[in-house]
Amino acid sequence: MPRALRALRRGITAVVLVGLVLAPSAVDDYTVALLARTLALGLVAVSVALLTGVAGLPTLGQTAPYAAGAYASVVVGGQLSDVGLVHLGVAAAAGAALAAATVPLVVSARGVVVLMITLAVGELVVTIVGRWRSVTGGTDGLAGIPPVRPLWGLPVLATDRARYLYALVVVAVLVGVVLLVLRTRVGLLLRAGRDDEARLRASGHRVALHVAGVHVAAGAVAGAAGSLLVVAQQYVSPADFGFDTSALLLLAVVIGGTWSVGGALIGAAIVIASRDWLFGVLPGQAPLVLGLAFVATVYLLPGAGHRPPAVRGRLLPPALTRRPVPDRPSPTGVRA
Amino acid sequence: MTPLLSAHGVTVRYGSLAALDGVDLRLELGQRHALIGPNGAGKTTLLDVLGGRTRPAAGRVRLAGRDVTRLGPAARARRGVNRIHQRPAGWPTLTVRENVLVAALPRAAPTRRWWPGGARRAAARTTGAMLERVGLAGLGGTLAGHLAHGQRRQLEIAMALAGRPRVLLLDEPAAGLSAVEVEWLVEFLRVLPRSVAVLLVEHRLDLVYALSDTVTVLRDGRTLATGTPAEIRAAEPVRQAYAEGVA
Ligand SMILES: Nc1ncnc2c1ncn2[C@@H]1O[C@H](COP(=O)(O)OP(=O)(O)OP(=O)(O)O)[C@@H](O)[C@H]1O
Ligand SMILES: [Mg+2]
């Protein structure tokens, strides 16, 4: 990439970051709370981008670890600790555990099949959440969740502004960690797998293990986002994790992020903003418009032939579906 | 002596056609073994079976005495069986250096196993050495997808060697190369350490006789003869097979 372009992008990133830090003093409390929820959703979108763009597993099921993380942090908050860091750790672990449990379902599938499997997993989790009244409050949800303190010895996050800044710091740190990891050997192997998975296997790499690893890591990120959601809105219900959320996430990632972690965050912001704007101008038809946008997304998904240039290390080149193994047909009694 | 890599009664069928029909082959430690035969004889299919890409309908494959018939390409690569791939050169959106590094990682041997990053450092060392060896050191930062045809072959060789192979399977490595590049390839294979055994499929008999110490002739999925280049050159059935098959 030309140096000027890189400098320009750095500049834009810096302006956006400063804007995000200063935002709470420029807008009202309601908008600040909305921004905090958007950050949580943006972090889930990052996990969707990891799966969709980096590992080639387009997913509609990241609401499952997101929900697991949210309810895990509610439980911890009620019984163990009011420290945000503890909530984040437990939520990430819960998301990772749920993702690990579903690894066998997804690692050998591809493309649209993954969409269907992950959709089923997501819906199943929402159903369980709706029925498990003793922990989740059922479909009514849990309200009045007490605020957390970020670390031991710090004051509790009593205002929307404080909760927003907490979410901002957590998202910045986690996204930074994801970007750093993608610059290491892990990122290199993932890029190679997206280029040609069969060739990677032929070199002796355990590709299924790589995919499983990304799946679990994405589950942890989504779980942590669940904890942020609880902090941001102090309320949680199964409606936060329904199909419309999954669809918005995939839409966000296709808009901004199959090839980029930062783009996933921007995509989430655009999607939330346009959803709320649509609800304002077309009260009745907003779900229909979003539904159409989603259908278009899925329709575009497997083909997505126009690949933006690979931006190494930072943002990742796209690959919505992993390429089918371009092999000769199998001989009889043989697995290729 | 146990051969390093061997096929025993290997049969592969495509529908009613037997691409391989009870083939035996022994590749000894450090051997330079050429596999020749007319088009459609089953040479590529045999490499596919030895490399783990195709599972035979009957027969066994052994690596240093151990039955590896059921292992796929990845597991065999981890045990030191590497194939030089022709079609794509590695991963096109990775640089040349990254390609070799990725190929080196599965069998990188860190000096201290418990030290974090050891495998990566060992792989990086191997990568540098391999790029020097195949003459691509100056192109480490180039995207593999931008290489010329001959350079891709060099890259594939570097990648295969970076995996520290015990066995190198080559399918028509000279195909599509210029005369100069073929010369380079022959010289390269000639000085390749004997710790690597080579099984070479090649149509050009001049290369076969220059490089190999053992030749196996395959025809219609069966082995016709195995012997030294001199023996094979003299054998009547081989001449016949070639007179009918290949120019
Ligand atoms: N995937 C396949 N499906 C059906 N038939 C196949 C397949 N692959 C190979 N064959 C057939 O099996 C036989 C052996 O093919 P193979 O490619 O092993 O020959 P080869 O000796 O490598 O030939 P060449 O010198 O042309 O490369 C041929 O008759 C070929 O048509
Ligand atoms: Mg062939």
Image (spheres, coloured by chain):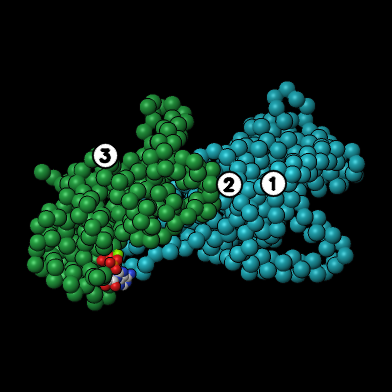
Chain colours: A cyan, B green
Residue B63 lies, with reference to residue A110, above or below; the image says above
Foreground: A101 or B209?
B209
Local secondary structure at mark 2: helix
Q: What is the C-alpha distance between the residues marked 3 and 1?
A: 43 Å
Q: In the picture provided, is B115 more to the left or to the right than B208?
A: right
Expressed as whole percent of the image width and height from the top left, the position of residue A86 reads: 64, 32
Q: Which residue is mark 1?
A: A2
Q: What is the C-alpha distance between the residues marked 2 and 1?
A: 31 Å
Expressed as whole percent of the image width and height from the top left, the position of residue B21 reads: 17, 67
Q: In the picture provided, is A145 more to the left or to the right than B238?
A: right
Expressed as whole percent of the image width and height from the top left, the position of residue B149 reads: 44, 56
Foreground: B99 or B72?
B99
Report the residue at 70% width, 27% height from top.
A151
Q: Report if the CB atoms under discs 3 and 1 are less than 8 Å apart.
A: no
Q: Which residue is mark 2?
A: A218
Q: Earlier in the sequence, mark 2 or mark 1?
A: 1
Local secondary structure at mark 3: loop
Q: Amino acid at mark 1?
A: Pro
Q: What is the C-alpha distance between the residues marked 3 and 2?
A: 44 Å
Extreme residue toward the front, this view: B180
- Figure quadrant, ligand 1: bottom left
Subunit of label 1: A
Q: Answer few, some or many: residues within 10 Å of disc 3's Cα (few below 14, many 20 plus, some between 14 and 19).
A: few
Subunit of label 2: A
Q: Answer few, some or many: residues within 10 Å of disc 1's Cα (few below 14, many 20 plus, some between 14 and 19).
A: few
Q: Which mark is residue B193?
A: 3
Work out whether disc 2 and disc 1 sit on a shared chain.
yes
Q: Amino acid at mark 3?
A: Pro
